[in-house]
Structure formats: C-alpha cells, structure tokens
Image: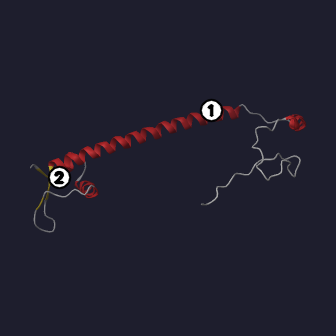
Amino acid sequence: METLTTSEAADLLGMNVQKFFRVAAAAELTPALEAPGLRGAKFWHRSDVEQLAKANDESQVYRDCVLAAHRIIAKLTIAATKQFDEDAASLRVLTASEMVDAEANAEQIPLGHLIPATAGQSETPSDPGTPAVAAPQRKEAR
C-alpha cells in the first residue's frame, strides 16, 4: 500500500494543501495514517487520491460543458438582440393620417386568432370595441 503526504496528494490534484483538505473532507476521504499530536502529519492512500483526482477531472469536464453551453446561449442572445435592433430600426412612426386610416380599417381585421370564450362567459363583450377573450383556466386543488 503506497501512501502520499498531504503535500504530495495536493500536488497530484493540482491544488494547494488547504484546498486539498477541503476537497478531501467533502469527499469524506480519511487518511491512511496519522502521526500523533494535534497537528500530526497525515498520509493518504495513493489509490484514494487518484480516485479523487479522476472524480475531480470528471466534474471539471462537466463544468467546462456547462460553461460552453452558457457561451453559446450568450452568442445566440447577442445575435437575436442585433437582429431585433435591425428590425426595430426599420420601423417608422405612423403619420396622423395613416393612424386615422388604420383605425378606420381596424374593424376589418379578423379576430379568429383570439381564444374563444369559455362556457359560462358571454360571447359578446360588454364593450363593443373589446373582443371576447377567455380567462386562463385554473386547476382545481385535489
């Protein structure tokens, strides 16, 4: 059974001694040998430290994948924002006469895409200028 000092184990994992102790405690890794005294030297099984290094590498791969996904999402968000800005730049403010024409033609706009009224609701809205739209359904508690 080959053992490592705390310093050697930390070097194998690529971290300092303090971080090694935190990682070892989180992994519930116990020393193979411990010298007497309050601050006695600790020796670790090489196989336990190598297993911890493998787990650390796997979690690093996972973190790298998550980071890559965040970068892709950020790039897509930037691209969508740029496209939105380009589309918004092409919009223009209507003149007063165009607004009057739009209001006059508003009654001709089909409202078939609206959600139909649910049972018990009036199909005719109280305000003739307001289309009937169903309220969201609530699920009953069991």
Would you say 104 lies left or right of 86 here? right
Q: Is residue 117 above or below residue 39?
A: above
Question: Which residue is rendered at x = 79% and y = 37% of the image?
Answer: 112
Give SS at disc 2.
Answer: helix
Tag 1 residue: 83
Q: What amino acid type is highlighted by mark number 2?
A: Ser
* Quadrant showing the C terminus: bottom right
Q: Is residue 32 above or below residue 61?
A: below
Give SS at disc 1.
Answer: helix
Tag 2 residue: 7
Give the CA separation, mark 1 to mark 2. Answer: 54 Å
Q: Nearer the viewer, residue 118 or 24?
A: 118
Quarter of the figure with residue 96: top right
Query: Percent from the top left, x then y, of residue 17?
Result: 22, 54
Q: What amino acid type is highlighted by mark number 1?
A: Gln
* Dots 1, 2 in contact, CB < 8 A: no
